[in-house]
Structure formats: structure tokens, C-alpha cells
Amino acid sequence: MTASDPCFLSVAEAAALIAAKRLSPVELVRAYLARIERLDGTLHAYVRVLPDEALAAAHAAEAETAAGRHRGPLHGIPIGLKDIYDTAGVATEGGSKLCLGRIPAADATTTRLLKQAGVILLGKLTTWEFAIGGTAFDTPFPPARNPWNTERDPAGSSSGSGAAVAAGLCAMAMGSDTGGSIRWPAAWCGLAGLKPTYGRVSRAGIMPLSFSLDHAGPLTWTVEDAAIVLQAIAGHDPGDPGSADRTVPDYHAALASADLKGVRLGIARGMFERDCPASGAMGAAFDAAVEVLRRLGASIAEIELPPLALYNATASLITRSEGFAIHEKTLRERPQDYGALARDRLTIGAYVRASDMVQAMRRRLMLVEATEAAMAGFDAILLPTCPDPAPVLGELGPYFDNRRPMYMRPFNLTGQPALSLCNGFDDSGLPLSLQIVGRHFDEATVLRIGHAYERATLWRERRPQL
Amino acid sequence: MADNIEDRFAVETELLGLKLLPGQEANLRAAYGVLREAVALVGTDYPFEAEPAHVFAPAPDWASRR
């Protein structure tokens, strides 16, 4: 890596250079393709690279710019898509033997919106099988590795998305988040990962796992980049029954304020000190981040949320049940074609009774209301994203290990926007993470807080040494 | 219904008509225990009128709805 390596420009930086005709999308794509060629044999971030298509799109983007047609900040920006995002004419296989050779006829809504905004698709990215299968070694696709230490897990299920952005193999990537699968790889790979409000970004054309908990969103190097991407993909889509018809604000304008005066933050200390104590490094990084936010002008107080275990149990029953409903036919007809982890994690949903599911949905509403009530007087909640940094690849509990639950699932259940960002590194150089959770449809405040924090710290200056 | 959790797992597996692959039963039995713990934690003692969260996209007046 060098300071001038175009693969390490943020989206905002690259966009400014492209708009000024000081950076060619063709040269940018060539740089990424060369880096993918050099590193992805180790990282396995990509399941499919599209060099010819990417170069053709880059030439087209360059021609558009030359002709005076500039689409905006994603014009000519090379990206990757988790391989559950449908791409017209390009295989989308969900990390599964069951979908080998599956070629969608149409783009996912988000794929289409990103293309309209001018992105260049470099390829499709590794995913846990059907976004649930865990770090598996028995599917056709090898698991992605963490660029900060290739013996470590990048987390999932958007594992390739996290690895690719951190390693400089694309400028940004899309992921999906049912129980944390955008924020978790963002946390372990040192990125910004935004799970928008449920309903804010369309899931049409993205392989589902759990209809009422699935969210789509970006993994980026900076919070500013996440704002740029969200601007392009947010909005109502009749093709997604969960899509909300709500006004989309100007997210970049929300980043303009350098300080956080008037912002009220609640620390959910009970979750990471009582319910599942965070590691020493994670706790120390959290405390240091709170002091940065306080210096920026935010007011800070404690907030008490319902127990983490109650959120997680409720979300677990819903995910299992909805996931089994989606996969039941195939699980009964072709169980041998699933990897063992995906097969077991989906099959257990058969044992959730109808009344169990209804009780979970009743509990869900109570938890949503309790969370809303706890947030009275606050603009956002602060807590770590995970209790620990990345473990060795393959050491994640294979079957339903609840000993060290993450802090992300509550906000899939409530549907609130949640952002993970890097707030330091442990002694071995692995990224640590901070989570900012906002009110429904108030991504702007979440992004503002995250951006102010990033500008006040130096963590974005460190990249993996590969 | 069987009394212990292992018997309940066996009975429910048969009722569901699931054909488990070799090695799958032990994993699922362990997972079943975790699942029943989750069910117990979520509970059943709700007020008669307590509704489920059947609308996922929050309405503008979400917080004041009830």
C-alpha cells in the first residue's frame, strides 16, 4: 500500500477526483482488478470478478464525464455486491450449491439504483450460505478471511463485503443485516456499516432470510461514504412489501456540522457490562469514544434497555421461523445440498410452533415500545457492536452459541437505524467497534454523530498491511 | 407430550416428518434445547388484548399508537 494508491481512496475522495477529471474510472478499475488479482487468492472476498464488464462500464463512465454528464458522487465508483443481490445476467448464487448457475433476469432494486447512480460493479462477494450458514468449509465457496489478520474471521454473513472494503478490493460494498450481518463484519474489519431503518431501503431482489428482520445497507471505509450510498438507495419501493413511503432527507447536508452540540446520547451500559460484559479492550475503546463525543458537545447519560437476552430470544424465534418458511420445500427435498451449518440453522425453525411465533411477535411489539420509551429525551443510543474483536477463523460457535451474544440483534427487532464504526484497535491490531443507534428513520443523526467522531479521531488513517 | 426435552425432540421430529441426515440429529437436539429456552424466555403470560407486531414498517405515529 502507498499513500497514493487509488484503491485506498474513500468514495468521497475518489468522487471528487473523478468529477474534476483528475482520476479516470478506467484507471481506478484497473487498479482494483490488479489488487484483486494479487490478494483475493488469500482473502476469498469475491466469488466472481467481472473484469470485462467492469472495464466496459468504466469506459462508459469516462465517456459520460467527458461529454459533460456526471451522475453524482457514485459516478465511476467501483463496488462489490454480496452474492445475494440479484444482478441481471450475472450469476447470483447465495453461497449455496443449491443456487449454482442461478442467473437472475433482473437487478435487485438496490442494484438498479446504484447502477443508475453510476457505480461500476467489480464482482459478487462471498456470503455465508443464504446469509445464515456461518463460516463454513463444506460449500462450493471458501470462507472469506479478515484482511487485518488472515487467520481471523471477518464475521458474516456479509463476510466478503467486509473483507473486500477493508482490503481495498472495492470502494464500497453492499451487505444485508438480519441479526447484525452488516454491522458485524464492519466491526471486525474496521469499517463503517449502516443498517438503515426497516423500510428505508428496498430488499426487493435480495435473497430473503427473515422477512421482518432483513435489512439492506452499505459497508464503507468512512461514515461519509455510507451517507453517500444511502442517498442513492433510500426510498419507497412498491416491490418490497416492507418498504416505507417516507421522505428521504439530504444525508450529506446532515454531516455539515463539525460539533455535536445539542445531541443527546444514551449509553446502554447494562447490555455490555451486565448482560454480556465486553472485553477489556472493547470497553476501554468505548469509554474513550464517549469522551471524544462529549468533547464534541454531545450530552451523555445512561439509558436502561430491556435485557439483551430477551431481545435475542425473541429475534431468534422469528428468524428461525421465517427462515424455515422460506427454505422448507428445499430442506425437505434436497437437504444434502445445503452446508451443514445452514441446514441445521434453518431446519431448527421447524420446531417453532405457531403459538411460539405469535408470542414472539407480541413480545416484539413490547420490546419496540420499551425501547422507544427508554429513548425519551435521547437522540441516539451508544454501545459497542460486539463484545470481542475477531476470533480465529472457524472458532465461532458452530451451533447456536449464545455464550457471548452480540449487541446488534435488538435493533433488527425494533427496526431502528444502527451504525457500526471503528473506534480503535486492540494490542494485536484487530479493529474495535462502536455502535450508534438512532430513532426510526433518523439515519441523518446517526450519520452525523459517526462522521463527527471519525473527523475527531485518526482511526481512518490505518489500513491492513497486506 | 413427552416429559423430557430429548423425548420431546424425538416426538416433534417425527410429527414434523423431518428426515434428518447422518450427524444432524445431535446438532439439532442441542439446538432444540436452546430453542425451548428462548420460548420460555419470551413467555406466554401476556395480557389478553396484547397484539403481536404485525405491522413491521413503523407508522409516523408509531410511538403514540397505543
Image (cartoon, coloured by chain):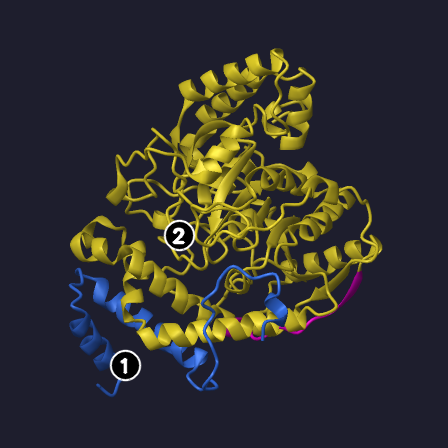
Magenta-colored span: A299-310
Which residue is identified by label 1? Answer: B5
Residue B21 in percent (x, y) is at 17, 60
Instruction: Please give the label number shown on residue A394.
Output: 2
Compared to residue A115, the image places residue A274 above or below, namely below
Residue A22 in percent (x, y) is at 68, 15
Compared to residue A277, the image places residue A324 above or below, namely above
Q: Which quadrant of the figure contains the N terminus of chain A?
A: top right
Is residue A308 part of the magenta span, yes or no? yes
Q: Amino acid at mark 1?
A: Ile
Q: Which chain is blue?
A: B
Q: Amino acid at mark 2?
A: Gly
Q: Secondary structure at mark 2?
A: loop
Left or right of A52: which side holds B65? right
Can residue A64 be seen here? The reply is: yes
Tell me the quarter of the picture where residue B2 sits.
Answer: bottom left
Q: Secondary structure at mark 1?
A: helix
Q: Which chain is yellow?
A: A
| Protein chain holding label 2 | A
Q: Which quadrant of the figure contains the C terminus of chain A?
A: top right
